[in-house]
Amino acid sequence: MIEHRSFASLGGANHGWLDAKHHFSFASYYDAKRMGWGSLRVWNDDVIQPNTGFPPHPHKNMEIVTYVREGAITHEDSLGNKGRTQAGDVQVMSAGSGIIHSEYNLEAVETRIFQIWIESNQKPNSPSWGTRPFPKNERAGSFVALASGFSEDTEALPIRTDARVLGATLKAGEQLEYSFASANRYGYLVPAKGKVEVNGLLLNARDGAAIQQEEKIVITALEDAELVLVDAS
């Protein structure tokens, strides 16, 4: 089963400095049919204006993955971490027992991000933060684990949950397969750019595909595409 969630159908709000679209219920947007997908709880598509951002605020017991699509995001937290994550790269914050952080666009252009929250399956422990580059040419034609709770994904940023966040790029006409460990896994796929088909279902850029009871998906790029996939329990 693959459910198409068009970008036009997403909830959200435009705050001026932030134009946010929500794949799942979040803040003032509520849809009883879109409360989450397995342990995946949030997928926000955010456009942040220059020299604005999210002031310091707290989180607990959540794995928060930020995929930067355009521009860059600058992070600072109560652990003393500071860092800038630019387009194509990823940062992970494990909120653990509690952390306060801010995220600002200090660039001269809009910053566009996917912010993905996945429930932790570990007891709350010390929070952490990390970032690393993931060059797009290194994920051309195949999925690369960007963040993962599985020890075999040694190059991925670690998260404290039974899930993976993966990225891939495809040229128009290319095809890519992904197999889930079992049909009980929950997949959620969003093309950051480009138009694709997933098992024959058409997805435009920034549409979502909620995947369940599928052991394998076949993705065909109708245009040059940049993909982000969550494989969750």
Image (spheres, rainbow, N blue to C red):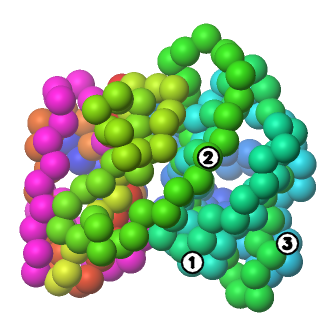
**Residue span colored magenta:** 173-202
Residue 167, by quadrant, is: bottom left
73 to 91, vertically: above or below: below
Q: Is residue 177 magenta?
A: yes
Q: Residue at coordinates 10% horizontally, 68% vertically from top-left?
A: 175
Kindly indicate whether the residue at mark 3 contacts the one at mark 1 (C-beta within 8 angstroms).
no
Q: Position of residue 100 (x, y in %)?
A: 84, 39
Which residue in the structure is indicated by mark 2? 130
User: Alpha-carbon distance for marks 1 and 3?
Assistant: 15 Å
Mark 2 and mark 1 lie on one chain; the one further toward the N terminus is: 1
In the image: residue 26, left or right of residue 215: right
Q: Is residue 210 magenta?
A: no
User: What is the three-letter code of the residue carrying label 3?
Assistant: Thr
Q: Position of residue 78 (x, y in %)?
A: 87, 39
In the image: residue 149, left or right of residue 42: left
Dot 3, how many residues are within 10 Å of its Cα: few (below 14), some (14-19), or many (20+)?
some
Q: Residue at coordinates 49% horizontally, 63% vertically from top-left?
A: 133
Dot 2, how many residues are within 10 Å of its Cα: few (below 14), some (14-19), or many (20+)?
some
Q: Which mark is residue 70?
A: 1
Q: Which mark is residue 159?
A: none
Instruction: Give whichever of 29, 129 is nearer the camera.
Output: 129
Specify the farthest residue to the bottom: 108
Which residue in the structure is indicated by mark 3? 52
In the image: residue 31, left or right of residue 139: right
Q: Secondary structure at mark 3?
A: strand
User: Alpha-carbon distance for marks 2 and 3?
Assistant: 22 Å
Mark 2 and mark 3 lie on one chain; the one further toward the N terminus is: 3
Q: Secondary structure at mark 1?
A: strand
Q: Residue at coordinates 75% horizontally, 64% vertically from top-left?
A: 74
Predominant SS of the magenta segment: strand
Mark 1 and mark 3 lie on one chain; the one further toward the N terminus is: 3
